[in-house]
Image (cartoon, coloured by chain):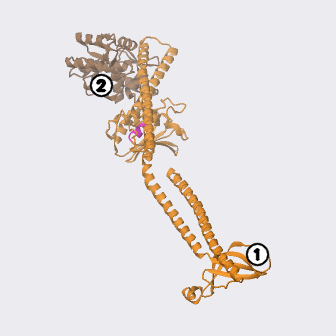
Chain colours: A brown, B orange
Amino acid sequence: MKILIVEDETGLRESIEEYFTGEGNICETAKNYTKALSKINLYRYDCILLDINLPDGNGIELLKKLKDNNHSDGVLIISARNSLDDRLDGLNLGADDYLVKPFHLSELKARVTAIIRRKSFNGSNILVLNEITIDLLAKEVKVANTAVKFTRKEYALLLYFIANKGKVVSKNAIAEHLWGDGIDMANNFDFIYSHIKNIRKKLIEVGCADYIQAAYGMGYKFIEE
Amino acid sequence: MKLLTRYNQVNIISTTVIFIITGFIYYQTISWILTNQKDKSLTVEEDEIFEYVHLNNKLPQIFQSEDQQITFTEVKNDSVKRQFIDTEYLKKWDNNNFHKHHHKHKNHYEKEPGRELITYVKIGDKLYKIQIIESKVETEDLIRIIFVITFVVTLLLILVLLLTNRLILGRIWKPFYNIVNQIKQFSLAEPKEVQQPETDIEEFSELGTAVTLMATKAKNDYTNLKTFTENASHELLTPIAVINSKLDTLLQTENFNAVQSKILNDLYSAVSRLNKLNNSLLLLVKIENHLLNKSQRINLKALLEETESQFEEIIADKRLALNLDLHEKEIVANHYLIEILLNNLFTNAIRHNYKGGKIQISLTAESLIIKNTGINEPLDENIFVRFNKSANSEGSGLGLTISRQICENFKFTLNYRFENGYHCFMVNF
């Protein structure tokens, strides 16, 4: 997939680029409004990560230009302003998602993956990964045609891992993904451990490979063999 | 004591004192003038007697009159001095008079205040003491009438003063109380401005201007402070985002030993806390600024059940016994804020509980009560104050402040009570 990162903060831009590059992903970056505008006029992207506050313009204007030209690039707005109006404005103008700074890269990856999945698999909502088949609409998981029953949170966690496969996902990121920022329980990680233990157990029971590994006591990693 | 009351008090006391003094002086002056006149009339009588004695060389014949009595007494040499004295005048009633004044029937004499001139005359070798007494009853009556009139006028004046003060001053002071009421109701956080009262009294309009000016200034300063907090929090978001993303990137590099893992974990926790703290501050500013006021109807029972399901793993993990007793209740409020409120209360009930503890949640039409076991002693009364948190708490210290702010925003009240080993947080609608 081809991704454009529009972000003026160098450190953040570089981190995102590094995290997304690889596995057949191509990342391009723009550090300001002008550069981003010239890029979206020339090329098409699967997903554009759009910072709203740019030194020489407003990211919302870029979004409007895209939609005026009927470009179907996926757009994920990254904003430091957690205001409901901004969120609604962005989504009403046709953005696919809205993420508030600061965020975990794994969360960003999961959201971008979801956007691209929605755009590219038009109609077909089946995700296949080796022996695992996931029906994204019905929220059903099958391993070699055997259905596996997951709880809501286990299912969400599995998708999260698959979107971030090959990357170490921190416990903080997992906790925030499952419970949101509203719930201040992130430092209590015991229940994450039991969730992951359950997922692994359920997968292995139906003959699936053990994809999830613990990483240095800091997080977990989904390894595609 | 009200200024008006104090003013009236001083006014009445001073008026009364002045009237008493004036009355006394008035009385003295009039009675001096009248006595003087009496004395003159006595002197005229004396002159007549002297003239008679000079012409006839004998005492005149005494004839009784109604308001004058003259007596002559032979005395020894040099024992009489000429002088005026106040005395009693014995009025003798004749029969006609007696019948007219029949209530005086016991006595044929009536005592009246009188004025007496004691003098002497020499006829040949003999010295006669002359006593001329005149009744002063008319004088006394006159003085009494004057006194009564003065007294009545004084009373009337005081009455009029009181009434004027009450009516006119009450009306005049109205703008003042208007300003005071506005100051009492003044709140920095509320958008309501202080109104300049309508008055043509310079002092009050000046006071009104000063108060309005002060309120505007205070509000501006407060807004600046809030804007500063908001901006500072916003500016912090970007560096936190960078740290967060760099940590995520660092995590992808291979092979950490145990020490490095521990450090990285601590960094993650610290950044996470920093972020939550910052978000809480932003949220607080937003609530105080009434920026989140889009209200809608919320089925509180459904929302509570939803919140509960969010926490079920954590509750199960801590082996907490949760007891829900929920009745239907609908409120009109901001969905996002009520979610935060419920999350905060749930989080507290779980976090400050012990393994195997209890949580009881009851929702009625009047209130939402969340009870939880925990340390077996009541919490500090400052729990709703910013950054007040227990030593072992991992929270931001803003959770309850935010919760209370949210409640106040929708005119609910949030209170704490320690009861039978339970910490109870009550939201009264």
Query: In this picture, is B386 found above or below A79?
Result: below
For marks 2 and 1, give the CA distance.
145 Å
Can residue A214 be seen by looking at this rendering? no
Q: Which residues are magenta?
A: B405-410
Given the image, on which type of amino acid does mark 1 rest? Val
Q: Residue furthest front?
A: B55
Left or right: where B134 falls relative to B274: right
Rendering quarter of residue B294: top left
Of residues B57 and A151, the one nearer the viewer is B57
Q: Say which residue label 2 marks.
A: A141
Residue sitting at x 48%, y 13%: B256
Disc 2 crowd, CA 10 A, few/some/many (<14, 14-19, 20+): many
Q: Say which residue label 1 marks.
A: B80
Q: Residue furthest bottom?
A: B95
The answer for which chain carries disc 1 is B
State which quarter of the image contains the C terminus of chain B.
top left
Residue sitting at x 49%, y 31%: B397
Q: Position of residue B403 (x, y in %)?
A: 43, 36
The answer for which chain carries disc 2 is A
Rendering quarter of residue B234: top left
Name the element at disc 1. loop
Query: In this picture, is B3 found above or below B142?
Result: above
Q: Position of residue B152 (x, y in %)?
A: 51, 66
Name the element at disc 2. strand
Q: Position of residue A140 (x, y in %)?
A: 28, 27
